[in-house]
Amino acid sequence: TKGLTAHGEEIVREMLRLGMLIDITHCTPTGRKRVYEIVEETGSTECLISSHTGCYEINRDPMNLEDWEIRWFSDHGCVIGIILMSYWLSPVDTGMALKHVEHSIHHICNITGHDVASIGTDMDGFTDPPDEIVSIDQMPRLTKYLAATNHYKEDQLKKILGGNSLRLLLNGWKKQAPCFTDSPPYEACRAVALPSPLQRNDLKMTKYSEFVRNYLAKRNLPKKKNTEDKKDEKKKKES
């Protein structure tokens, strides 16, 4: 039930001034409401994300966002990531949970259109993902499931499956450092976002993998020493 302390409010204001994105996922309802008020006081937009959550109207847990909050996110250009965990998405915790993920996404889209909903897997080892997707390499199953419902057009799927999150991140980077938009990470994100989500399984992130290798090579980062390298160095020192 507690909200923000005075120091917490100062931090929120400073983050907004710097152009940082604020994740309110683990805020209390009272704390979230105060963050929204500060955002409005500063006139900020595209500054918040609720990275892994659900919808209060579907599952009445205080972690989940109420419908008025979902509309607030839409009005301020912010993004909501739906967690891949039925415990938060449904009053009945079931293993086969893709239907609950889609239900939550569809609920948000019915309120706001398709510029707010995104995916927030929270696959950090502590959550219980749907039985249909137990690891990140199985994410194409979610794409196929969403497409099979016929609730979304292809351009809408692109937004939900990454486009909305990328928009928020890229516009946040522009606020922080406009020159960053000309650097490799920005172009790489755009390249990854372009292919159709229905073809994403064939892409297998090839473009992004190539970018990472090329980008690290250009930076001339020192090679990470393995165990054998360390042994050789030790022998040289001893000799």
Image (tube, rainbow, N blue to C red):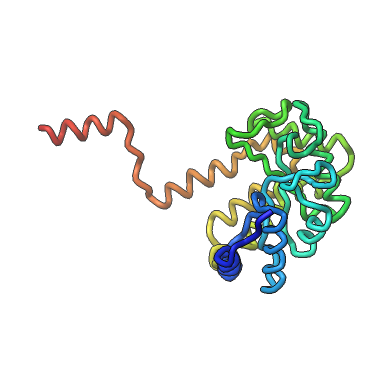
The residue nearer to you, when weighing 217 against 105, is 105
Whether residue 206 is situated above or below residue 111 in the rendered picture: above
Q: Residue at x 53, y 59 (%)?
A: 183
Whether residue 140 is situated above or below residue 195 in the rendered picture: above
Q: Quadrant of residue 12?
A: bottom right
Q: Residue at x 63, y 54 (%)?
A: 23
Residue 1 shown left or right of residue 100 in the figure: left
Where residue 167 sits: x, y (%)? Answer: 68, 57
In which quadrant is the C terminus drawn?
top left
Q: Residue at x 79, y 46 (%)?
A: 55
The residue nearer to you, when weighing 110 against 237, is 110
Where residue 179 sits: x, y (%)? Answer: 54, 67
The residue nearer to you, when weighing 99 against 225, is 99
Q: Residue at x 87, y 54 (%)?
A: 111
Residue 221 shown left or right of residue 113 in the figure: left
Numbered-mark total: 0
The residue nearer to you, when weighing 30 against 223, is 30
Q: Residue furthest left?
A: 239
Where residue 178 sits: x, y (%)? Answer: 57, 68
